[in-house]
Amino acid sequence: MTKKILFIILLVFPSGFFCQHYPHDVPEHDFIDYQHNYIDFFQDSSNFQKFYSKLDSLLFYGEGKINIVHIGGSHIQADMWSDRVRQRLYNFIPTNNGGRGLLFPYRLAKTNNPYYYKVEYTGDWKGYRNSVLSHDSEFGVTGITAKTKDSISTVKLTFRGDNYPDYDFNKITILHNQQTESFCIELLSDTTAIRINNDSIGYTAFWLSSYQNKLEFSITQMDTLEKEFALYGLLLENQDPGICYHSIGVNGASVPSYLRCEFFEKQLSLIKPDLIIFSVGINDAYDTQFTADKYENNYDTLISYFQKVNPKAALLFTTNNDSYYKRKYPNKKAEDVRDVMRKLAYKYGGGVWDMYGLMGGLGSVKTWENAGLAKRDKIHFTKAGYETVGDLLFEALIKSYNDYVGKDN
């Protein structure tokens, strides 16, 4: 990196961009070791260099689109942790408007929806999750499916605004079962949009006449060849330079849950992520049949899905948070999960962000609970806790990027 570019960075970020601690707007806590909040690399990290090079182009020239995928369980379905990182990245780069990306209208599946977008619908819908073995359904990249047999139904999604970005978009991709001739999808929120159907992947896309922050579409059954309509997710995009932070999360999901998703790789090809953040492990560690070898082998398969789509993507593994089994017993398997993630990072040239260690290790979730950052179940965080975790992960990413910038590239 030339001195000229370093000088530009100092102009853009005069308030200590290169400081060891990136400022957050949440209270600091003496039980968090902020100086050890970083990404560990164990060998070649060239794919991260490629990711940071794209970040350079976006930051200094306002060029390019960066796709980040964050995959996990209930921590990600609620989208407080991941959306915190999304917002910090959104505000980090001037004029960044990369769009919201992949999401699911969880309310259709009768499960909890992120706060910042509202979902309304008509028709009788049934939900299926990849984490529930008794849910006999096909799954796509989101790991969740909503189905209806009604002759006509509607789905409406609106970003609330408030203190959240609008994440406006001018392209909508509706991921669904592949028999498009059996159902007619009409975009009610923009009747002049240009439609594109793709039966091989299974989607209907609409190019909008203007940027929007809400959508509504109808599904009408045209014949009886396909008895039900299956919705696998929505992809909301724009053509502006920026970061698009996609979140994939299902309550109770483990690594094998995502291996059930037969359309995962096919639909992931629509995104082609530059960085994948793997946060799948908390539910694996609660499995009484858990072994480190099986966990690693399952992760090898999941990683292969992503590498087939983009073999040059950067891989970041986030270790489990400290948690308790039945609120009584510290789950020591979090340390096995961390060991496996370090092995995976070495194997694939990825990085590890050690949330478990940052929290304080075994039993530390009690301290977080006493501070109002973790819930009484000693597994999940409160809103303030998820914001803290999001700030820490964002800070670690920026520290790693600072290291890249500081080198003579």
Image (spheres, grey):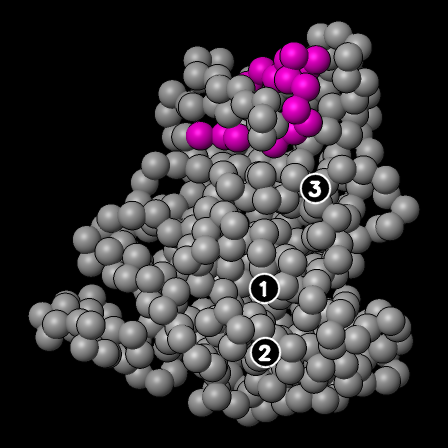
Q: Can residue 395 be seen at all in this image of the molecule? A: no
Sequence order check: which comes first, mark 3 or mark 2? 3
Q: In the rendered structure, are the residues bearing label 3 and label 2 in contact, judged by CB atoms less than 8 Å apart?
A: no
Of the residues under marks 1 and 3, which one precedes in the sequence? Answer: 3
Q: Which residue is mark 1?
A: 278
Look at the image and give the residue range highlighted in magenta. Answer: 171-187
Q: Main secondary structure of the magenta part?
A: strand
Amino acid type assigned to the residue bearing label 3 in the image = Glu
> Residue 26, percent across and down?
50, 74
Residue 76, how many percent across, how many down?
64, 58
| Residue located farthest toward the top when viewing the structure as drawn | 223
Left or right of 324, for residue 189 = left
Q: Amino acid at mark 2?
A: Lys
Q: CA distance from mark 1 to mark 3?
A: 19 Å
> In the rendering, which numbered label is found on residue 262?
3
Can you identify the residue that label 2 sits on? Answer: 343
> Do the numbered discs 1 and 2 sit on residues whose CB atoms are within 8 Å?
no
Examine the structure image and report whether residue 181 is included in the region drawn in magenta. yes
Crowding at mark 3 (Cα within 10 Å: few <14, some 14-19, many 20+): some
Residue 17 placed where, x, y %? 28, 76
Q: Secondary structure at mark 3?
A: loop
The quadrant of the picture occupied by the N terminus is bottom left
Disc 2 on helix, strand or loop? helix
Residue 157 appears left or right of 351: right
Identify the residue at image location x=23%, y=79%: 407
The residue nearer to you, when weighing 375 against 33, is 33
